[in-house]
Image (cartoon, rainbow, N blue to C red):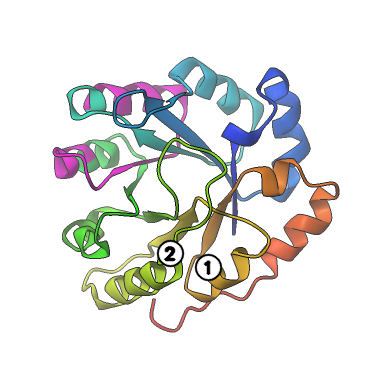
Amino acid sequence: MAEMSLWSADLARLGAEIARTEPFTDLYHIDVADGHFAPALLFFPDLVAVCRRSTAKPLHVHLMASDVILEAQIRQFADAGADAISIHAENQNLEVCLDLIGSLGLVAGIVLQVQTPVAAAGAVLDRIGLLTLLGTRIGVKGQALDAQAADRLREARALIAKRMTPGPIVLCADGGIRENTVPDLAKAGARTVVMGSLAFASENLAERMAWIHAQPVERGLA
């Protein structure tokens, strides 16, 4: 699978960028940050509503928001047209907010920062359909992939395999996605990678996405 991050699109031509990439992506990734939980200020509900009107592909909102506003933000982005909302394992009201996402009819997901143990996802695996592991610090573009990223994906894949409840969980890799890192991340178990400039800056998008979709994903444990 391929997940394109609209943070890397030409935001002055957002509708045209979505039209250009829609034939090649499986879903769109929308980073939302409040300037507190993460250092950036990214996307807002009205802009997500514009994305919703521009594509039929699923919209995956990665919500980087402080606990005090998290529930309100979930409701706002659900109203704006999100299909899935992932929140951070580091949020204190994690389980309440995962239940809220599910009650709104959306796919719930959690995101782990690079410093958060993979085991932190264990207690909520029965509530989610997406598990995203960050390979770089949140809110900052252009970082190199953390050296432990592939090992953390393998650990997450094993954790998913041990759960007792049925239903698929899509394991995602986000951050440090480059031509030289994608094969190792896929082999480690990433079902989808969050592509930024690797997609939007590609000189031949069709060729690039064919390469992405052809990556062998290790599925033996999950």
Image coords of residue 108 (percent x, y) = 33, 46
Count of picture labels? 2
Image coords of residue 70 (percent x, y) = 25, 28
Q: Is residue 204 above or below residue 57?
A: below
Q: Is residue 47 above or below residue 108?
A: above
Q: Which residue is mark 2?
A: 149
Classify the position of the C terminus by image quarter.
Answer: bottom left
Residue 68 magenta-highlighted? no
Q: Which residue is mark 1?
A: 185
| Magenta residues, start to end | 71-97
Residue at 37%, 72% in the rendered image: 157
Q: Residue 8 sits in which quadrant?
A: top right
Residue at 23%, 22% in the rendered image: 69
Residue at 30%, 53% in the rendered image: 128
Q: Indicate the amino acid at tag 1.
A: Leu
Contact (Cβ within 8 Å) of mark 1 with mark 2: yes
